[in-house]
Structures are given as C-alpha cells and as structure tokens.
Image (cartoon, rainbow, N blue to C red):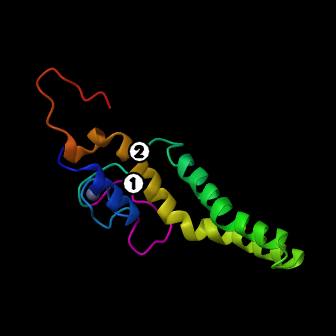
C-alpha cells in the first residue's frame, strides 16, 4: 500500500487530500465549498449525494459533547446562571458547527479512507485485462 493509514489520518486531521496530501479539499478563497475533485491528483472529493451526511452527524456530535454538555454541567453545578447558559448554548449551537465545518468534512473523508484505503487511487494498480475496479 503506497498511502498508509497513518498518512490518511494525518492528512485528514490537517484538512488535506487523502490521496496526495495537497491542500486541495476546499476551493481556494472559499471557506465552505469543497472542490468536486482534487485539482492536484484528480481524487473525486464530492462523492454521491448523502456521503457527507455523516460529517453533519460528526459535527453535531462534537458540538454536543465538546460544547453543550460542558455548558449544561456548568449550569447544573451553579457556576453559571440559567440565562447565561441559555445564551451560551444558543450561540454555541450555531457557532461551533460553523467553526468545525471544514474539519468535519475532512474527518469524514478521512474515516472513509481509513476503513477502505484500497479505494484511494494512489493505492490501486492498473486493472489487468478483463478486470473491472468494482468500486
Ligand atoms: Zn489530491
């Protein structure tokens, strides 16, 4: 295997293309628009519809566990008032997913290729005559 799982992990954490490691996941000059494919290596980033629903779930999960639960704990232990907790939760419920958007997309793509590293073009050999890729 040419691209290892360790490389896929580090590239995913750094929001880089899992195939070539280029800073090409998102369109240049844009914060939220994914490139349909990597301009450097041609890896198809925009996959079938619904592929990135998992990244939304990941984003919500991170928001709940890393932000909303700590705010709730601070409220329940009396550190912050109920009004302040409600305001903080409302701001965080919108702000944290926006801040985590790019990472969640990259992490979701990373998790796919961590499970199926042989699907990366860099890890595939040319098909032999009569074979299809079946991907
Ligand atoms: Zn690439």
Foreground mark, 2 or 1, reads 2
Q: Is residue 47 visible?
A: yes
How far separated are the C-alphas under marks 2 and 1? Answer: 17 Å
Q: Is residue 46 visible?
A: no
Pick the residue in front: 80 or 8: 80
Please provide the residue range marked out in magenta: 26-39
Q: Look at the picture and state if 91 lies above or below 97.
A: below
Element at label 1: loop
Residue 56 on image: x %, y %:
59, 53
83 falls in the magenta region: no
Q: Hey, which residue is sitting farthest left in the picture?
A: 129
Mark nearer the N terminus (2 vs 1): 1
Point 42% across, 48% down: residue: 111
Point 45% across, 56% down: residue: 107
**Left or right position of 51 against 77:** left
Which residue is the site of mark 2?
112
Characterize the local packing of mark 1: few (<14), some (14-19) or many (20 or more) Cα atoms within 10 angstroms: some
Which residue is the site of mark 1?
36
Point 19% across, 39% down: residue: 124
**Left or right position of 118 against 30:** left
Question: Magenta stretch: dominant SS?
Answer: loop
């Amino acid at each position: 295997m040419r691209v290892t799982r360790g490389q896929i992990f580090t590239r995913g954490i750094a929001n880089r293309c899992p195939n070539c490691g280029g800073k090409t996941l998102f369109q240049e000059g844009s914060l939220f628009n994914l490139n349909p494919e990597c301009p450097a290596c041609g890896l198809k980033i925009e996959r079938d519809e619904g592929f990135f629903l998992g990244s939304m779930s990941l984003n919500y999960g991170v928001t709940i566990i890393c932000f909303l639960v700590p705010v709730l704990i601070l409220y329940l232990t009396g550190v912050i008032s109920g009004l302040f907790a409600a305001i903080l939760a409302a701001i965080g419920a919108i702000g944290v997913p926006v801040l985590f958007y790019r990472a969640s997309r990259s992490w979701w793509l990373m998790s796919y290729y961590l499970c199926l590293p042989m699907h990366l073009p860099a890890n595939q050999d040319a098909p032999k005559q009569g074979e299809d890729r079946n991907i």
